[in-house]
């Protein structure tokens, strides 16, 4: 309640009967009277007193105005009352030539009229209220303050009748909450408390006493008889009661303000309206949710705290509504249960508190109206708003959104089905966040994965269990989103995306992703990912695709993989070994190697083998290994003849050592078994004996020798002519060309090495008196291979062109 001046208005209400009678029978006069005629008496309207600079004089004159209105009420002179209100409005408020004190007088006069009218104010409320609202937007802070005071006193009398004009009053209050003048702001706060009290007490029950009242303020209303003065429009379809539906659009417009004071004002009103059960305010939460979530990023801590509490209350109410509604659903004997209802039963009924159950049961016994059973909540719209706000990047907003989504998944899982692609697009990148955001995102993703798995299972096994009108998961849209997420910079996001794709691939019974799909090529490209875990998961997916349709896709997959190896040497060097090992984990190892071998052996793939062969000519041992893997044993044996023409340096010997270890590994099991068939694979035995001749007597030498000795009784086939060599599908001419390619490449390497060493080795030749006398021994491999550093003269001798004799080489030097 206002202090000081405020009591001036309110004391009229309590004036004694004697005083009222005294003023009713006295004649009211003013320095410049306006004569009013009545069927019973004549009286004059005071003007100058309301324009007086002294507050006491204006107050005294307002008292006279009150008595004048009382007289008119007794005379049932409604037209006279309207005339007084018009004079106060047009002459004191709207007049362009009016002084500030005239505005003060007009406002105090209108308040006096409202007090005098009492419960009969409803008929005249619009004409009284409009000029007061007009002054609330005045540029003069004192006028705005007096307008707050005037509206406060009018509100004390009108009470629930104010609901007819709630929107313009609320609109004005929202602006005054951010007023720069402290006195105006304080006055607005007192007025705000009064309006809140009235709303809290009467909003759910009040019915206007005016039959045709449907007045409400419009944002762009027509003008009054005085130019540029707004009036209150009418909506014939509205009743006189408080309408939450008409208030929400105004809230939705104001919710995006930036001023923290206005935000606090809005949050307080939202909490107030939500606390009135009969208004069913929770139904309108989707309309305001976006703006409220934005308040969680406000710099003002008070705004953030108040908004967090408000949103927590909303979520608790939504949970309560869901539990009560499902409780009644369970009681319905004619219900048709489905998977979603059974899922909610486990979540909702088991979490109902004893107090809530007692409340529902008592209401049923007493026949009371249970509001929660009739409230409708648009979960799908709420989820849409939550997803949009998840992009904000603000931790508090993201935590709130993820908490809401996790709870809504329990309450209304069916509303998530159509939104799964969008949810994945926004939630998976949050795995890289810090703190609670990442953990909440992981928990939501895990719960959603379980839900999707069950849905996919039911779609295959029992579609009727999902219900008749339930949407299905859009697998294509989900896969497209997950493919996009494979480019995310966070490793965990990429891994989770692949896990989800694997899950959908397994559950969809081959309906998604085949080797002919563009998605398959996209997954192949991800094999170059920097993360071993991502590559491993990707290979698991590709393996599942490869072995689907009874393994018909395996060969296509292996061909694609070999093509990638051929096109990108760096990819081959860095990833080939890891990829093949992982493939053998996911697919039978024998199928993998046999598949590679069959591809390399076929004539139609000759060009691919030749492509690999030419690229590998730079490394003799790697090329020899390729021939063994491709089962080109004759070519491998012939390669060894060229080995004798190149310098056997330490690098080659170490690689041969590793090759022997690889031959003894499970990778070459099938090749070792082929040693038992010398008639079919004579070139294989010849090639391995050739390697044995290249090796110094070391542990690798002994290992290979012992292996070959195991097939000694079968070596009678070693004398078989070349015509019986197993050439596969390769002709002699092609083998000759490949050998010449290898010889030419290695000669280039020898010439390059020779050029590098010429200048470096000339000085030691001149300074060494006895070059044959100095040798050093150096270990070179784990298997015991050692080498003697040759004397300088022998080094120079080795630099001679390949094919010349030792004598010839010395002559050239």
Image: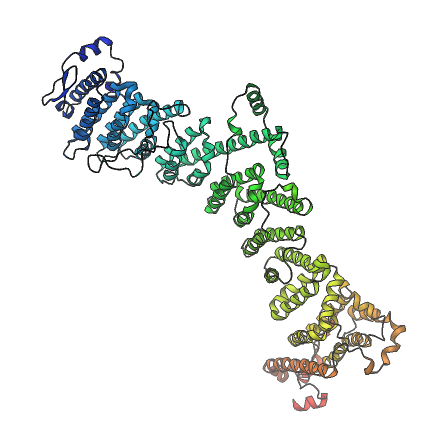
- Location of residue 206 (image quadrant): top left
Residue 650's place in the image compared with 311, above or below, is below
Quadrant housing the C terminus: bottom right
How is this picture coloured?
A: rainbow
Residue pushed farthest left?
Answer: 31
Residue nearest the viewer, comparing 434 with 86? 86
Residue 288, horizontal then vertical, whole percent = 43, 38
Q: Nearer the viewer, residue 391 or 104?
A: 104
Image location (x, y in percent) of residue 348 = 60, 32
Seen from the viewer's position, the closer of residues 137 and 365 is: 365
Q: Residue at x 63, y 35 (%)?
A: 336
Q: Is residue 598 visible?
A: yes
Q: Residue at x 9, y 21 (%)?
A: 31
Horizontal and vertical percent for residue 509? Answer: 68, 53
Q: Residue furthest front?
A: 39
| Count of number-bearing discs | 0
Q: Is residue 220 left or right of residue 656?
A: left
Q: Position of residue 455 (x, y in %)?
A: 63, 45
Q: Is residue 782 visible?
A: no
Residue furthest out toward the top:
18
Looking at the figure, which quarter contains the N terminus? top left
Determine the image quadrant of residue 210.
top left
Instruction: Please state if 426 lies on the left or on the right of 696 as rendered.
Output: left
Closer to the camera in the image, 404 or 571: 404
């Amino acid at each position: 309640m206002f202090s000081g001046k405020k009591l001036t208005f309110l004391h009229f209400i309590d004036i004694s009967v004697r005083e009222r009678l005294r003023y009713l029978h006295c004649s009211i006069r003013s320095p410049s009277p306006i004569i009013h005629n009545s069927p019973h008496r004549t009286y004059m309207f005071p003007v100058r007193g309301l324009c007086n600079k002294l507050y006491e004089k204006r107050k005294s004159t307002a008292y006279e105005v009150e008595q004048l209105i009382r007289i008119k009420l007794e005379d049932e002179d409604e037209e006279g009352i309207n005339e007084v209100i018009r004079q106060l409005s047009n002459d004191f408020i709207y007049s362009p030539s009016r002084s500030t004190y005239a505005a003060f007088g007009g406002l105090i006069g209108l308040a006096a009229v409202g007090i005098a009218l009492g419960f009969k104010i409803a008929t005249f409320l619009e004409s009284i209220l409009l000029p007061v609202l007009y002054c609330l937007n005045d540029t003069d802070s004192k006028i705005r303050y007096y307008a707050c005071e005037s509206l406060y006193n009018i509100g004390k009398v009108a009470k629930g009748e104010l609901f007819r004009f709630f929107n313009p009053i609320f609109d004005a209050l929202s602006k005054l909450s951010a007023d720069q003048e402290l006195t105006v702001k304080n006055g607005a706060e007192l007025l705000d408390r009064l309006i809140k009290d009235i709303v809290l007490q009467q909003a759910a029950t009040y019915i206007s006493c005016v039959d045709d009242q449907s007045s409400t303020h419009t944002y762009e209303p027509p003008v009054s008889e005085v130019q540029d003065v707004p009036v209150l429009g009418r909506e014939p379809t509205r009743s006189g009661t408080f309408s939450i539906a008409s208030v929400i659009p105004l809230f939705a417009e104001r919710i995006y303000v930036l001023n923290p004071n206005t935000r606090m004002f809005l949050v307080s009103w939202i909490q107030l309206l939500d606390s009135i059960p009969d208004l069913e305010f929770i139904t309108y939460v989707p309309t305001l949710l976006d703006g409220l979530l934005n308040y969680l990023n406000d710099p003002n801590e008070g705004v953030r705290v108040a908004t967090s509490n408000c949103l927590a209350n909303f979520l608790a109410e939504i949970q309560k509504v869901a539990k009560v509604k499902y409780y009644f659903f369970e009681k319905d004997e004619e219900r048709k249960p489905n998977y979603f209802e059974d899922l909610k039963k486990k979540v909702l009924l088991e979490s109902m508190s004893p107090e809530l159950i007692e409340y529902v049961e008592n209401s049923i016994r007493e026949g009371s109206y249970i509001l929660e059973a009739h409230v409708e909540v648009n979960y799908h719209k709420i989820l849409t708003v939550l997803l949009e706000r998840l992009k904000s990047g603000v931790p508090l907003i993201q935590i709130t959104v993820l908490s809401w989504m996790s709870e809504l998944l329990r309450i209304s899982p069916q509303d998530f089905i159509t939104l799964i692609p969008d949810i994945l697009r926004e939630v998976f990148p949050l795995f890289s966040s810090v703190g609670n955001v990442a953990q909440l995102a992981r928990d939501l993703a895990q719960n959603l994965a379980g839900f999707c798995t069950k849905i996919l299972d039911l779609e295959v096994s029992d579609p009727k269990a999902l219900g008749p009108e339930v949407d299905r998961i859009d697998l294509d849209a989900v896969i497209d989103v997950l493919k996009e997420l494979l480019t995310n910079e966070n490793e965990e996001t990429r891994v989770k995306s692949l896990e989800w794709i694997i899950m959908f691939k397994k559950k969809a019974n081959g309906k998604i992703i085949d080797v002919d799909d563009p998605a398959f090529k996209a997954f192949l490209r991800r094999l170059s990912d920097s993360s071993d875990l991502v590559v491993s998961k990707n290979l698991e997916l590709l393996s599942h695709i490869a072995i689907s349709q009874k393994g018909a896709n395996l060969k296509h997959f292996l061909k694609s993989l070999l093509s990638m190896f051929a096109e990108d040497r760096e990819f081959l060097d860095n990833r080939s070994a890891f990829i093949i090992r992982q493939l053998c984990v996911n697919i039978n190892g024998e199928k993998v190697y046999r598949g590679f071998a069959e591809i390399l052996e076929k004539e139609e793939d000759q060009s691919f083998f030749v492509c690999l062969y030419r690229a590998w000519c730079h490394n003799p041992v790697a090329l020899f290994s390729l021939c063994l893997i491709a089962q080109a044993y004759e070519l491998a044996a012939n390669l060894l003849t060229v080995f004798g023409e190149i310098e056997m340096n330490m690098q080659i010997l170490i690689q041969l050592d590793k090759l022997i270890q690889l031959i003894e590994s499970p990778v070459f099991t099938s090749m070792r078994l082929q040693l038992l068939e010398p008639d079919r694979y004579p070139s294989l035995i010849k090639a391995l004996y050739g390697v044995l001749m290249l090796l110094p007597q070391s542990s690798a030498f002994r290992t290979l020798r012992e292996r070959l000795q195991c097939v000694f009784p079968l070596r009678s086939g070693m004398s078989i002519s070349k015509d019986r060599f197993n050439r596969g599908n390769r002709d002699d001419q092609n083998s000759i060309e490949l050998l010449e390619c290898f010889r030419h490449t290695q000669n280039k390497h020898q010439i390059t090495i020779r050029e590098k060493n010429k200048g470096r080795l000339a000085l030691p030749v001149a300074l060494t008196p006895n070059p044959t006398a100095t040798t050093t021994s150096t270990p070179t491999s784990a298997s015991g291979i050692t080498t003697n550093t040759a004397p300088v003269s022998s080094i120079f001798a080795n630099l001679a062109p390949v094919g010349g004799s030792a004598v010839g080489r010395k002559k050239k030097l």
